[in-house]
């Protein structure tokens, strides 16, 4: 939907589809870290641009909601969901910034697994906002995102266990942790989004994203 075609009678789901699709794009950019010799400056730049798109969409949605006929509670809940989705992209962009700061041309296998989990979660979130309200489907979606977050925690712990066993220099641990923390935050932010989507669809009778 063109950003300059705002109206009081917006199709809210269209906005959230755009924000969610942007998360998929962010995941695809992060996927570049799975390739050896990656140009971190390029990934950083592309993730920053995607984060700006996300911020613009959220700002447009907020302005449009202010002119809509929705209740104050609905506007507040929708803005909460939009901000939660934007937070996912912010953490993706922060991971790219940290990788670029330390000029990391490759990531440990555990962090590439975190990237894969983020991509999975972003795709599932896009599907959740594309579909018509479905309590059973949203419950499955939310539980799957919880599983992804649990897998991310286990994967990240495995990295630290490996460092304890094989040894790791303080500088390596600091640099990898700076990126890994943001990837972990992104996955847990996706989990938060899943909880909010299910909560809002239930609380508003399946019409909140209409």
Image (cartoon, rainbow, N blue to C red):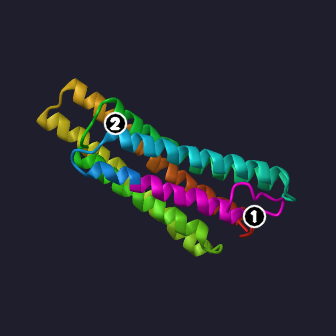
Q: Quadrant of residue 130?
A: bottom right
Residue 151: image quadrant is bottom left
Viewer can see residue 92: no
Q: Which residue is mark 1?
A: 204
Residue 19, compared with residue 94, is above or below; it is below
**Label ID, residue 67:** none
The percent coordinates of residue 53 (x first, y second) are 58, 48
**Quadrant location of the N terminus in the rendered image:** bottom right
Image spot of residue 103 (x, y percent): 29, 33
Q: Is residue 161 above or below residue 198?
A: above
Residue drawn at (24%, 25%) of the image: 171
Task: Tell which of 170 and 6 is nearer to you.
Answer: 6
- The structure residue drawn at horizontal position 25% and vertical position 38%, both measured from the top left corner, is 160
Specify start and end residues of the magenta stretch as a single range: 1-28
Judged from the image, the secondary structure of the residue bearing numbered disc 1 is loop
Mark 2 or mark 1, earlier in chain = 2
Task: Estimate the x, y position of residue 157 in percent, counting from the top left.
Answer: 29, 43
Q: Which mark is residue 99?
A: 2
At x 45% / y 59%, what residue is drawn?
Answer: 121
Residue 206, relative to residue 190: is it above or below?
A: below
Q: Secondary structure at mark 2?
A: helix
* Local crowd size for mark 2, using a 10 Å CA cut-off: few (<14), some (14–19), many (≥20): many
Check disc 1: other Cα within 10 Å, few if <14, some if 14-19, many if 20+.
Answer: few
Q: Using the rendered view, name the quadrant where residue 197 is placed.
A: bottom right
Q: Are marks 2 and 1 in contact (CB under 8 Å)?
A: no
Q: Say which of 155 and 106 sits in front.
A: 106
Residue closest to the far left: 166
Q: Is residue 24 one of those drawn in magenta?
A: yes
């Amino acid at each position: 939907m063109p950003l300059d075609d705002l109206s009081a009678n917006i199709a809210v789901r269209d906005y959230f589809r755009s924000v969610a699709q942007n998360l998929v794009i962010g995941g695809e950019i992060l996927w570049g870290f799975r390739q050896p010799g990656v140009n971190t400056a390029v990934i950083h730049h592309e993730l920053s641009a995607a984060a700006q798109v996300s911020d613009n969409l959220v700002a447009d949605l907020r302005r449009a909601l202010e002119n809509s006929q929705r209740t104050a509670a609905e506007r507040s809940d929708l803005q909460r969901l939009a901000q939660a989705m934007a937070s996912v992209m912010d953490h993706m962009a922060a991971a790219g910034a940290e990788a670029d700061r330390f000029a990391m041309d490759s990531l440990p296998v555990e962090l590439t697994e975190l990237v894969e989990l983020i991509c999975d979660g972003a795709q599932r979130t896009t599907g959740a906002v594309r579909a018509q309200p479905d309590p059973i489907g949203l419950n499955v979606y939310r539980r799957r995102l919880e599983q992804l977050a649990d897998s991310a925690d286990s994967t990240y712990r495995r990295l630290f266990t490996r460092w304890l066993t094989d040894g790791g220099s303080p500088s390596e641990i600091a640099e990898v942790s700076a990126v890994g923390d943001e990837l972990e935050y992104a996955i847990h932010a996706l989990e938060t989004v899943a909880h909010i989507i299910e909560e809002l669809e239930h609380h508003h009778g399946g019409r909140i994203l209409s």
